[in-house]
Image (cartoon, helix red, strand yellow):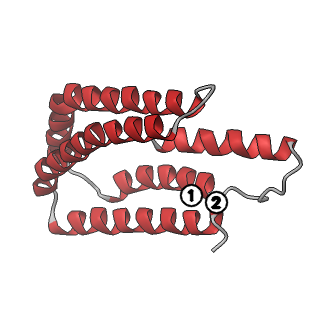
């Protein structure tokens, strides 16, 4: 979903530049997104997972993969419907709202699935590792909040 937002931002930015509208010289949201992707790799290294932890986590992820893919496909399918409503030759607010409302359910299901997987994985981590994960997730959220605020000119 964030990838779709980043692509949309790039397309809108390109169109605005072609129209001669003022552009931000940097793209804080995209920069923040790419920065956080690199930080995920660092976190994996910094956690110093044991081989047993890696095996158990891999087993959980592998066992839940079909559910995750199904949930993501539902979100993507509904998101495409929102885009179709937005891009319609004569878009109607009510149709856009209805499509967006239908997207809420698969997003909720994906969030629940993510929570369930987290509840399976977190007990495998040592207290210090859990603290590292929670601190990292807080930093990611703060980074994205700053990027949104900067993009909005706040």
Residue positioned most to the bottom:
154
* Residue 4 x %, y %: 52, 38
Nearer to the camera, 108 or 136: 108
Task: Specify whether 119 is left or right of 19.
Answer: left
* Residue 50 x %, y %: 20, 50
Quarter of the figure that contains the N terminus:
top left
Task: Specify whether 70 is left or right of 55.
Answer: right
Q: Residues within 10 Å of mark 1 (few under 14, many from 20)?
A: some
Q: Quadrant of residue 138?
A: bottom left
In this view, 78 is above or below 104: above
Q: Secondary structure at mark 2?
A: helix
Nearer to the camera, 84 or 41: 84
Disc ID at residue 32: 1
Q: Residue at x 34, y 38 (%)?
A: 103
Q: Which residue is mark 2?
A: 28
* Residue 131 x %, y %: 24, 69
**Answer yes or no: do the residues labelled 1 and 2 have beta carbons within 8 Å?**
yes
């Amino acid at each position: 979903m964030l990838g779709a937002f980043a692509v949309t931002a790039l397309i809108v930015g390109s169109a605005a530049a072609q129209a001669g509208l003022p552009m931000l010289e940097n793209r804080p949201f995209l920069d923040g997104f790419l920065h956080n992707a690199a930080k995920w790799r660092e976190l994996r290294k910094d956690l110093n997972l044991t081989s047993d932890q890696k095996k158990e986590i891999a087993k959980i992820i592998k066992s839940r993969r079909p559910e995750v893919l199904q949930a993501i496909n539902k979100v993507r399918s509904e998101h495409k419907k929102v885009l179709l409503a937005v891009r319609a030759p004569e878009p109607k607010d009510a149709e856009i709202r209805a499509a967006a409302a239908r997207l809420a359910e698969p997003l909720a299901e994906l969030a629940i699935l993510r929570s369930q997987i987290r509840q399976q994985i977190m007990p495998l981590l040592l207290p210090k590792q859990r603290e590292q994960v929670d601190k990292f997730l807080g930093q990611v959220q703060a980074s994205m909040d700053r990027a949104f605020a900067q993009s909005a000119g706040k």
